[in-house]
Image (cartoon, grey):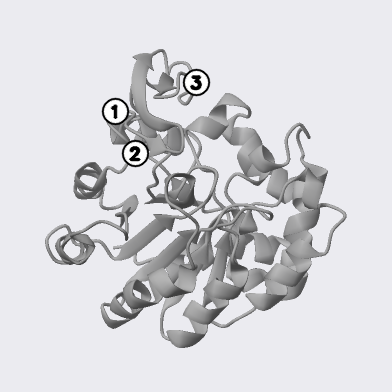
Amino acid sequence: MKIIDAHVHVFQNLQGFRGEGELYPIGNGKGRWANGDIIEMIPEGLGDKGFTYETCHRVLKENGVEKAVLLQGSFYGFANEYVAEAVRAYPEMFVGAGTFDPMARYADMIYDRLTRELGFRIMKFETSSGGGFMSYHHPFDLAEVFIPIAEKCEKNSQVLVLDIGSPGMNSFQPEAVRKIALKCPGLKIVVCHLLAPTLADKDTECFKESMEKLALPNVYFDLAAIPFNVQPETYPFPTGCEFIKSAKDIVGVDKLMWGTDIPSVLIQNSYKKLTEYLSEGNIFTKEELEKVYYKNALEVYLFQ
């Protein structure tokens, strides 16, 4: 079966920034935030201070992946130039997303350069309170900030990708994403991590109600990091599979795209497990799995 990983990260050096301040690479795949916290980011053997696109390409090939979407966020650090370089190096495998802080003074200028000079056909924004814009900015209305950007993306035939964090976070604003989607009906919007539900959301109505708000023709979801978000549950992640089954029932199989969120998720689980849990979950037929693993991403993202 053909596979596209719809959520991957590459970076030369760890250079993240979030509520804990800037991230400094200290070697062995670890980084230290400015507040002193140390975090393991890269699995052993895949990089000392970075997860290069050459290493990523090798890992994906070894696991039978044909194509991948290179997304960005402040967890690892913005790397627009490097992602563009990765796409130039392996155009048959990679499509890349640009990113920037919409609060930046020259945000419009940055958007224009990423679009026209670096050629990004995807714009991705990590807004989450956990590790995105709302971890180091005051809470803001996603619709107010991103409708102007969404209108530009629609005009330029780009895909807009949003990580709005998990239920309970200030950044978790599915109603704002709905407003953006309705304002820009010609724009494809991808919401990361299937709204990032955790075990705490298992017995609540929040996930179902949020998915119902986003059951729109132009809204899609990637399934990256679902196993990570339902920790300490282990393979084959039954609660994660229940969330996916619920999403399938609400928005339909055509709106779901498999992905991993490598590299950090490989610290907890092998790539093989992150791939196979979906087919072992008895959620999809063989034909539906072909859509979730491959065909849906091929329709949404603008691969060469």
Which badge, 3 or 1, is on the more N-terminal residue? 1
Label 3 amino acid? Asp
The disc label shown at residue 55, or none: none
Q: Is residue 179 left or right of residue 125?
A: right
Q: Point out the frontmost of discs 3 and 2.
A: 3
How far apart marks 3 and 1 lie (CA) works out to 18 Å
Residue at point 78% right, 35% down? 233
Q: Nearer the viewer, residue 43 or 26?
A: 26
Side (left or right) of 231 relative to 300: right
Q: Secondary structure at mark 3?
A: loop
Where does residue 44 sit, x and y in percent of width and height?
A: 47, 16
Q: Which mark is residue 13?
A: 1
**Element on which disc 1 rests:** loop
The residue positioned 25% from the left and 61% from the top of the image is 120
Q: Earlier in the sequence, mark 1 or mark 2?
A: 1
Disc 2 target residue: 77
Q: Is residue 8 above or below residue 245?
A: above
Q: Residue 180: x and y, percent?
A: 48, 78
Q: Which mark is residue 37?
A: 3
